[in-house]
Image (cartoon, rainbow, N blue to C red):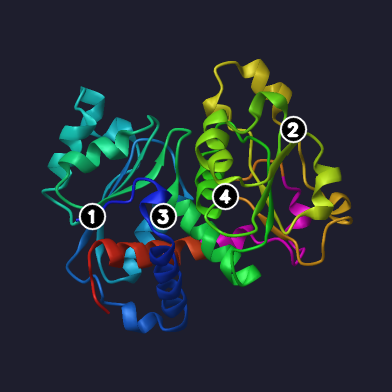
Amino acid sequence: MRNLIDIMDLSEAELQSLIEMAEDIIQNPTRYAQACHGKKLATLFFEPSTRTRLSFEAAMLELGGSVIGFSDAANSSSSKGESVADTARVVGCYADIIAMRHPKEGAPLVAARTAGVPVINAGDGGHSHPTQTLADLLTIWREKGGFENLTIGFCGDLKFGRTVHSLTAAMSRYAGVHFVFISPEELCIPEYVKSETLDPRGIPYEEVRDLERAIAGLDILYMTRVQKERFFNEADYIRLKDTYILTPEKLKSARADLCVMHPLPRVNEISVEVDDDPRACYFKQVMNGKYMRMALILKLLEVAV
């Protein structure tokens, strides 16, 4: 039985297989419409979510399966003090596969040890968000035709941005990738990402503060919001939240084939005026996320189509 706790749980070959399956789902949706008939997905979301939870639910429903679960920890027995391990063991009696989001890092791993069914990490604190990375990878694949020899800029909250940490790890396995980390000093990329992922592989990267100076050299710009829920001090959040705002004016110096991505939700770090720019790919990411989650569910349930 396989789980997906971290994006590095999947080999490059497995990532490619998921991408190819997602592409086939896009082209031949009716072939997959009943692939998970009789199967149940449990969505255990101890933290607010719109896209990820609904994307998982839509993915399972479009595969012909059904969905159970909760979208608020207050509606679960965790409000009575039940442990994550016990919750997972109980829900594993009702469902065939579990998608879990939790504010505490490592909670999905704890769940995976007791659930008895495959567990997918749908985001754990500021640590990892592997299925968003799957959405990101399919977007890059479809927009750029591959993963090698790309310069990727991450901008905004790189300290708490679990999507940034996961995508950096995934893309670090491909040749010729160069990272540009754009953030205020207080929200810079964590040392462990550099010491565990980048430095051992000799992957080139730079840390800068100025988005406008960096944007001209990028193939991909991955914007992120400053996450209010991760701050202990509201004054720090207010001071930092508008550090970077992408506007049509700032895009004038960018490449014509730049791919602008964002894991969403957006607050105001990308002007709505950018939405009509052909380089804006963040809503494509949403659709790509559904297709990759469909492919992942099929893989973990070992469903042959």
Between the C-alphas of marks 1 and 2, the distance is 39 Å
Q: Secondary structure at mark 2?
A: loop
Between the C-alphas of marks 3 and 4, the distance is 14 Å
Verify CB contact (< 8 Å) between mark 1 and mark 4: no
Among numbered discs 3 and 1, the one appearing first in the sequence: 3
Which residue is disc 2 drawn over?
Answer: 242
Verify CB contact (< 8 Å) between mark 2 and mark 3: no
Mark 1 is surrounded, within 10 Å at the Cα level, by few (under 14), some (14 to 19) or many (20 or more) other residues, namely many
Among numbered discs 4 and 2, the one appearing first in the sequence: 2
Which residue is disc 1 drawn over?
Answer: 97
Using the image as rendered, state which of residue 68 and residue 117 is in the foreground.
Answer: 117
| Amino acid, disc 3 | Leu
Asked if 143 appears above or below 86 in the picture, the reply is below
Q: Secondary structure at mark 4?
A: loop
Verify CB contact (< 8 Å) between mark 3 and mark 1: no
Q: What segment carries the magenta color?
A: 270-286
| Residue at the image point whose x is 81% and y is 46% from the top | 214
Which residue is disc 4 drawn over?
Answer: 263
Between the C-alphas of marks 2 and 3, the distance is 28 Å
Using the rendered view, name the quadrant where residue 304 is placed.
bottom left
In this rendering, which labeled residue sits more in front, label 3 or label 1? 1
Which residue is disc 3 drawn over?
Answer: 54
Mark 4 is surrounded, within 10 Å at the Cα level, by few (under 14), some (14 to 19) or many (20 or more) other residues, namely many
| Amino acid, disc 4 | Pro
Among numbered discs 1 and 4, the one appearing first in the sequence: 1
Q: Secondary structure at mark 1?
A: strand
Q: Position of residue 281 (x, y in %)?
A: 65, 61
